[in-house]
Structure formats: structure tokens, C-alpha cells
Amino acid sequence: SKKKNAIMILSAHSCLGKGCAVENRRATLKTDFAKQDVNIVGNTWTTRWLLGVLPKGYYDAKKGDTDAYDRMTEALVDDMNEILANGCMSATGEKFWLAVISVIGDWPFHQKTFHLTRTFGSVAKRPSSQTASKGICMHCLADQSGYPWEDFESANPNWRSTVGVSPPFGRDPIFLQLPHDPEMPTSIMGMDLFHGFHLGAGKV
């Protein structure tokens, strides 16, 4: 925003596109049309679809309407389910269907969107902390008693056996109204690789 305040932007994009800046030198004209490239190259006006925008004053629990964001995402989920079931007609008369395979965002986004009770903000700040940890991972019980999250050396760390055992949701997330794996509902959340690996495990 003009005042450099936080703003929530929701967008969608195809998982397939025109590739990335690193070209495949082995590609030929015969195989070019059949490639399934990632969606990185190209102007964002043509590769990303803007779905909604909310200034922080509208979605911040301390400043605005605590339900405004949920109402917006509920409307988006209704539209997504509609286009999955019935498709959308293009200007040329072709019909297209859209299926959401992952909801991607950074950790604060996932925390707010999926009403997570286990997040990165719950990590113990010091080894001597007396407060029982709530856990830091949406998929497992890492950082709870007996499940140290910083175990990167064991072939089978303790937290691995808890993946998918306990749901992390404080209440039912609206995005779980989309088709998803009922045995592992958190799998619909795309991992935040930049913060989780580049600024996290990757620095170990």
C-alpha cells in the first residue's frame, strides 16, 4: 500500500507454464510442444490470476473485522468448487475446469487461513523454558515433549511417527471444503520452502 502497510493478496496460478529461465538444451521442435514445464517464465499479468485483496485493517484481529478474511475466502472456495464441478466457458467457446491441488503461502498465512494451533510462533524460546510447548508443525508433533524438532541427524526422528496423527486446526478451515485427502488434510497446505528450508533446516 502507499503507506507501506501490510496487505493480503490472494492469487492463483497454473502449476504448468512456459518453464523457467534455465532452458532445456536438449529440447527440440519435435518435443517442445509436449513439455510440462513449471510456471515461472512470463509476465505475472498472464501467469497469475488475482483473486482478492484485503488491507491489514480489514483482517487484523486487533484492528479490524476478525471475520472479514474468512468471508472472503469462503466466497473464493465457493467459486473454486463451482468451476471444478461445472467448468468455465472461455471467450472462444472452450470450456475449462480448475482444480486446486495446493494452497501455498508463508507460515503466518497458513496460521491465519487454517486456524492452526501448532505454528512456528509456539517454539520454545530457550532450553530452560518451563511452559509445555504446543508444537510448531502443522503436520506432526515436533517440539512437543519427546519430539525435538531440531533432530536432523537421526535416520528416524521421533516426530516422524506423529505425522498426520493429530489435526492442528483450532476450527474447521474453509479451504478444507475443497477436495483434499481426508486421511492427511494438512497435505493441501503447500510448504513454505524459503522460510522452512533456506532460513531454517538448510542453515543447520
Image (cartoon, grey):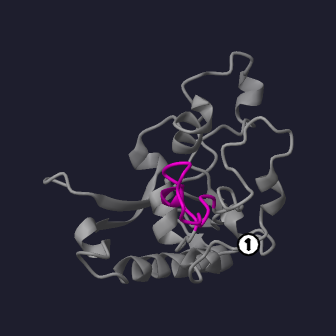
| Residue 195 vertical position relative to residue 158 in the rendered view, above or below | above
Residue found at x 44% / y 47%: 46
Pointer 1 local density, CA inside 10 Å: few below 14, some 14–19, many at least 20 = few
Name the quarter where the C terminus is drawn. Answer: top right
Q: As shown in the figure, which amino acid type bears the numbered disc 1?
A: Ser
The segment highlighted magenta reads: 118-137
Q: Nearer the viewer, residue 199 or 4?
A: 199
Q: Is residue 132 magenta?
A: yes
Report which quarter residue 100 is drawn in: bottom right
Residue at image mark 1: 166
Rendered residue at 57%/44% (across/down): 196
Residue 152 is situated, as x and y percent measured from the top left of the image, at 73, 38
Which element is circle 1 on? loop
Residue 44 x %, y %: 42, 44
In the image, 38 versus 115, the foreground residue is 115
Q: Is residue 84 above or below residue 199?
A: below
Residue 125 in picture, x, y percent from top left: 48, 51
Q: Residue at x 51, y 43 (%)?
A: 195
In the picture, the quarter occupied by the N terminus is bottom left
Establish if 149 lies above or below 94: above
Residue, x 59% and y 58% (percent of image)? 136
Q: Residue furthest left?
A: 3
157 relative position to 177: left or right: right
Between residue 162 and residue 25, name the one nearer to us. 162
Left or right for 117, reference 97: left
**Residue 2 in view:** yes
